[in-house]
Image (cartoon, helix red, strand yellow):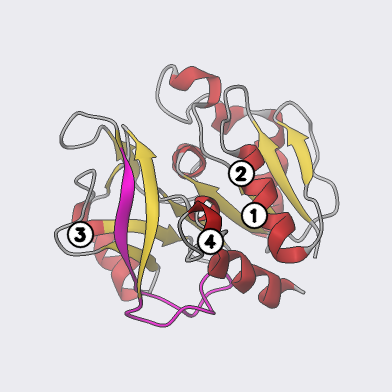
Amino acid sequence: MKSAVVVFPASNCDRDAAVAIEQTTGKKPAMVWHADTELPDVDFVVLPGGFAHGDYLRCGAMAAHSAIMRDIKAKAEKGLAVLGICNGFQVLTEAGMLPGALMRNAGLKFVCRAVGIEVQESQSVFSRKYENGQQISFPVANGIGNYFADEETLDRLEGEGRVVFRYAEGDNPNGSVRNIAGILNEKRNVLGLMPHPERVCDPLLGGTDGRILFESLFESLS
């Protein structure tokens, strides 16, 4: 399986994502600069966490108009698997690849800690090795991670099984509506989530709950 990690100015989790992918697949991903116009031949791409372009304007707003995003968007329409983590989730919403928006945390503070997550949907290329209802833990690190969408959109996401991850009851770190932590697009090949699975792929770093996500991708796309 071939993969890529996009690097934006001020990305800070690109190397974490690359290490997680290599540990899972045995192959190093291509590191693609945001100004490149075309992805290499890959099976999936990661938009990593960080502060793309310093989070000026709105988080992800400038990155969403990067040259590489035009190719990613076009290839996602044809089925390319895309994973957006934290800032990458913000980029996906700004690019119109996922519905809704990320707003400032309800507590108006940056939150960096492990949170409880409940798996809501295991029927996707990103989550097939989890079980519905499984309790896992991913760390979060965001100040603008409060997911919001209108009621019609939220009902559609729920009804179509597109809410993949939800913060455990009582452990919502940012005020996201309906405790939503990660969602799919309509084609189910694009996932955006605020918690960081790439940071829990090695027992030496506190757990391996995130490795299962990358293993799911590996099995689905190999």
Mark 4 crowd level (few <14, some 14–19, many ≥20, 10 Å Cα): few
Q: Residues within 10 Å of mark 1 (few under 14, many from 20)?
A: many
Q: What residue sits right under mark 2 in the picture? A: 16
Q: Work out how far the residue at label 4 is from the one at label 1, CA to CA, in angstroms.
A: 12 Å
Mark 3 or 4, nearer chain start: 3
Provide the residue designation for mark 3: 178
Whether residue 153 is visible to the viewer of this picture, yes or no, is: no
For marks 1 and 3 on the same chain, the one whose residue lies earlier in the sequence: 1
* Closer to the eye: label 3 or 2: 2
The reply to whether callout 3 and callout 4 are in contact (CB within 8 Å) is no
Image spot of residue 77 (x, y percent): 65, 57
* Residue 60 highlighted magenta (yes or no): no
Task: Determine the residue positioned at 55% across, 66% down.
Answer: 213
205 above or below 155?
A: above
Q: Residue 72, how many percent across, how many down?
A: 68, 46
Q: Nearer the viewer, residue 171 or 53?
A: 171
SS at mark 3 in the image: helix
- In the rendered image, the quadrant that contains the C terminus is bottom right
> Which of the numbered marks, if any, corresponds to residue 203?
4
The image shows residue 207 at horizontal and vertical percentages of 47, 61
Amino acid, disc 4: Pro
**Residue 121 on the magenta span:** yes
Earlier in the chain: of badge 4 and badge 2, it is 2
CB contact under 8 Å: marks 2 and 1: yes
Magenta part of the protein: which range? 112-134
Contact, mark 4 vs mark 1 (Cβ under 8 Å): no
Viewer-nearest of discs 3 and 4: 4
Looking at the figure, which quarter contains the N terminus?
bottom right
Q: Residue at x 71, y 53 (%)?
A: 75
Q: Position of residue 115 (x, y in %)?
A: 30, 55
The reply, left or right, for residue 169 in relation to residue 128 is left
Q: Residue at horizontal 56%, vertical 29%?
A: 63
